[in-house]
Amino acid sequence: MAETLMVAGGGTGGHIYPAIAIAREFLARDASRRVTFVGTQRGLEKTIVPKAGFPLEFIDVGGLKGKGPVDLIKNLFRLPLGFVQAWKLVGKHRPSVVLGVGGYSSGPVLLAAKLRGIPTIVHESNAYPGLTNRLLARFVSVVAVGFEEALGRMKAKNGVVTGNPIRAEFFLTSNQQPATSNRRRLLIFGGSQGSRVINNAMTAALMFLARMKDELEIVHQTGPHDLDTVQAAYRASAFASARVVPYLDPMADEIAAADLVVSRAGAMTVGELAAAGRPSVFIPFAAATNNHQELNARVVEKAGGGVVITEADLTPERLAAAIADILGDAQKARHMGEAAGGLAVPDATKKIVDYIEKIEGSV
């Protein structure tokens, strides 16, 4: 029977995109292999995984951490059903290895695999691991992490630092110099949906950056909801020629053209900026579980590749000062970019699949 990898988890793009990269590398090594995903109807995997060309099965589970009493009780009662569904799916597909990437569905599926004697591995992309992966770390065959800081927090004896799977095109940009000549390009984005916190802070910061109007070129991705408001703010500022759009694609090209990036600090964003070797001003999402975005960003700041401004400390003046400080000093910007690049792990996906192959048949 052909080797089969079952990938369990999802919920956010930060879980799903690394999983897809791992799945593609697994298949690329042997055309006879199969991959199937298991997620929930409520996660982003419902659209992202089929679009990437992979089959997707569903189980009915929900989160426990950070839930109100009603949702907590509902989700606790869902757990037995979710486990039975996971047990049946593992039996149906008979995977040779099961990979958990975090998210609600990871727990029941990896537990079912463990009880059926199937090797298991988890990948944790954030510096502070989610609850599911912290629990799973106690019994899986291998724990792979994107940040070394995650190992101690998972208390995993079988942990390895692999880095996070980042698409190859981001590494290709690391050797490219930004396309601007005398002007410095500033890129602002808050994820595919944008960030109102970043949008508001940046538009208010424009007046403090007005003296740089002849040397600064701005590209601002707003998300779909704040486009008109942000466009109006730019038109009324010294940066009326800024490119203000709801969505940017391909992001690798936009990052390659940037001298500085202002963004959130999800694990994939941090990894992509490191791969491209670009300095950053991080504004971590304050409501992220376990404050993991700030912890991701602090790793880069500690290495000298970025500056962190928490939402609690964020003011237009402070944001403008951070931007001016970096873009006003070409040598500083270059050193920060090099420091960020030093955190990149080009072969992370390969390392993870190497471990998947290593544990196959080991149980």
Image: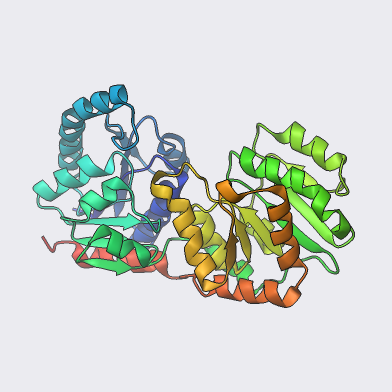
- Pinpoint residue 109: horizontal percent, then vertical percent: 21, 42
Q: In which quarter of the image is residue 140?
A: bottom left
Q: Which of 8 and 154 is in front in this view?
A: 154
Position of residue 43 relative to residue 353, above or below, is above
- Note whether 84 is above or below 359 in the view shown: above
In the picture, measured across the screen, residue 232 lies left or right of residue 173, that is right
Provide residue 216's location: percent of width, then percent of height.
Answer: 82, 59
Instruction: Please give left or right for residue 14 compared with residue 111 in the image.
Output: right
Residue 319 in view (yes/no): yes
- Residue 173's quadrant in the figure? bottom right
In the image, is residue 258 above or below residue 248?
below
In the image, 148 versus 341, the foreground residue is 148
Quadrant containing the C terminus is bottom left
Which colour assignment does the render follow? rainbow
Q: Is residue 84 rendered to the left or right of residue 144?
A: left
In front of the other: 348 or 4: 348
Q: Where is residue 285 in the image (x, y as percent from the top left)?
A: 52, 46
Residue drawn at (57%, 74%), measured in percent from left and top? 339
Q: How many labels does the image show?
A: 0
Percent x, y of residue 14? 45, 49
Q: In terms of depth relative to the viewer, which is nearer, 334 or 251?
A: 334
Whether residue 7 is visible here, answered yes or no, is: no
Q: In this view, does 206 lie to the left or right of 41?
A: right
Q: At x 18% / y 28%, what residue is drawn?
A: 81
